[in-house]
Image: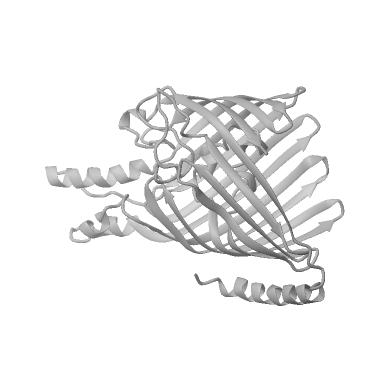
């Protein structure tokens, strides 16, 4: 894996500082380690059999008959510390994945050097910092919802990358500022397709203020490649026809993602706002997503409301294949089928209740009303045309825990 030259230079310089810091503190060998775990037992059902509801990246979901496959997961984490400079973290999770199985996967596995009190560097496998709750996306006990809103979080179903990052923390007045630059490569199975995002580089900046207010902004870009399916040689076939331009529009490799957000956790008030933008030059459409969540604690109970939306800004593919003959109509339909499968346009309202039963256990109930945009499959998998312009109810209950 080749790192971006800028980040490689920064890592080399920081590594030299870390080496010096380690040499200076070589006699302070003080190893320790800690184990923790988390999990969710969740039951979800919908009001339709015209498509399957799933979390981002999962292959296969639930329908009218319901099931435990969408939100149930189990995770464990080990933190090891050698001294005040060097440490390591490993996190594994078992959740329905992009292959449709529960095979355990390594989510984090990195070493960290605390070069100075403000500057740290990491290398290995880390969580991709795309969203407000990226660091604890799988630790649902830390979230108000049963799951993060799929209208926003479904835009980037990849959750980790292999590479390196630099993080700098400082204070300005009463605000705590954190800046992170990262580079690497993501490999994952997403809804049955193997995806690789290479030359991935990004930066995030966050600021924590008084009254539990946090602001965050970030952007990243990379080059994406897809295994078959979903295209199954379609661009190559189109290249032998007068409609080669349609095939070339399907296979671009550039992708970028940017987002801004804010959250508050002050006294009884809990809230979260995010606005995100995805751009590409292939069959994955350009989208804009946003979500607004508000909750109010009443003792151990926190009712909340979420409104969210994802809309297509550009399909990136103009299907100008005519339908004058049966063969052309079939080819036109194949291209339309690919575009329909990625047309994740919808808006949703959700209402829920969190009950903190114990210090480390929370019970939740959530009802989502998802309005699929006409001509779109929304965020549903294996959707039929009958799902378009339909309102789907999704009901879920879950038990989140940490230990």
Tell whether 372 sits left or right of 209: left
Q: Residue at x 74, y 26 (%)?
A: 297
Tell whether 228 sits left or right of 310: left
Foreground pick, 20 / 191: 20
Foreground pick, 355 / 262: 355
Tell whether 11 sits left or right of 60: right
Place residue 143 in its image quadrant: top right
Foreground pick, 295 / 74: 74
Q: Is residue 127 visible?
A: no
Q: What sort of colour scheme is used for the picture?
A: one colour
Image quarter hosting the C terminus: top right
Place residue 364 in its image quadrant: top right
Whether residue 21 is situated above or below residue 81 in the rendered picture: below
Foreground pick, 368 / 316: 368
Whether residue 77 is situated above or below residue 392 in the rendered picture: below
Q: Is residue 299 visible?
A: yes
Q: Residue at x 52, y 60 (%)?
A: 221
Place residue 24 in its image quadrant: bottom right
Estimate the x, y position of residue 278 in percent, counting from the top left: 50, 51
Whether residue 294 is situated above or below residue 197 in the rendered picture: above
Tell whether 391 sits left or right of 320: right
Image mark count? 0
Estimate the x, y position of residue 399 in percent, counting from the top left: 60, 29
Estimate the x, y position of residue 200 in percent, counting from the top left: 52, 63
Q: Residue at x 71, y 47 (%)?
A: 215
Residue situated furthest right in the rendering: 173
């Amino acid at each position: 894996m080749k790192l971006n030259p800028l980040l490689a230079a920064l890592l080399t310089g920081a590594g030299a500082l870390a080496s010096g810091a380690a040499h200076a503190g070589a006699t302070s060998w003080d190893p320790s380690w800690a184990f923790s775990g988390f999990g969710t037992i969740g039951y979800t059902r919908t009001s339709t059999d015209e498509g399957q509801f799933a979390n981002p990246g999962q292959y296969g979901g639930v329908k009218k008959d319901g099931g435990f496959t969408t939100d149930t997961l189990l995770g464990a984490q080990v933190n090891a510390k050698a001294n005040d400079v060097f440490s390591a973290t490993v996190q594994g999770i078992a959740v329905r994945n992009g292959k449709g199985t529960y095979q355990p996967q390594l989510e984090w596995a990195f070493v960290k050097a605390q070069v100075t009190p403000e500057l740290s560097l990491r290398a290995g496998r880390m969580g991709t910092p795309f969203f407000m709750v990226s660091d604890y996306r799988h630790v649902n006990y830390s979230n108000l919802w049963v799951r993060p809103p799929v209208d926003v979080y479904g835009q980037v179903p990849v959750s980790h990358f292999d590479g390196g990052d630099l993080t700098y923390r400082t204070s300005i007045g009463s605000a705590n500022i954190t800046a992170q630059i990262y580079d690497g490569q993501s490999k994952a199975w997403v809804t049955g397709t193997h995806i690789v995002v290479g030359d991935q580089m990004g930066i995030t900046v966050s600021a924590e203020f008084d009254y539990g207010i946090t602001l965050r902004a970030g952007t990243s870009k990379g080059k994406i490649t897809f295994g078959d399916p979903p295209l199954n040689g379609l661009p190559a076939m189109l290249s032998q026809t007068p409609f080669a331009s349609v095939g070339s529009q399907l296979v671009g490799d550039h992708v970028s993602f940017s987002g801004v957000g804010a959250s508050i956790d002050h006294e009884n008030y809990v809230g979260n706002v995010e606005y995100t933008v995805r751009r590409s030059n292939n069959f994955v459409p350009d989208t804009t997503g946003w979500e607004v969540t508000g909750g109010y604690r009443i003792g151990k109970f926190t009712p909340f409301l979420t409104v969210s939306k994802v809309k297509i800004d550009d399909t990136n593919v103009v299907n100008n294949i005519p339908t004058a003959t049966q063969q052309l109509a079939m080819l036109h339909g194949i291209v339309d089928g690919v575009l329909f499968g990625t047309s994740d346009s919808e808006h949703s309202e959700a209402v829920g209740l969190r009950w903190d039963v114990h210090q480390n256990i929370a019970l939740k109930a959530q009802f989502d009303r998802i309005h699929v945009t006409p001509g779109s499959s929304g965020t549903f998998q294996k959707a039929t045309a009958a799902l378009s312009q339909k309102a789907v109810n999704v009901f879920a209950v879950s038990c989140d825990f940490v230990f």
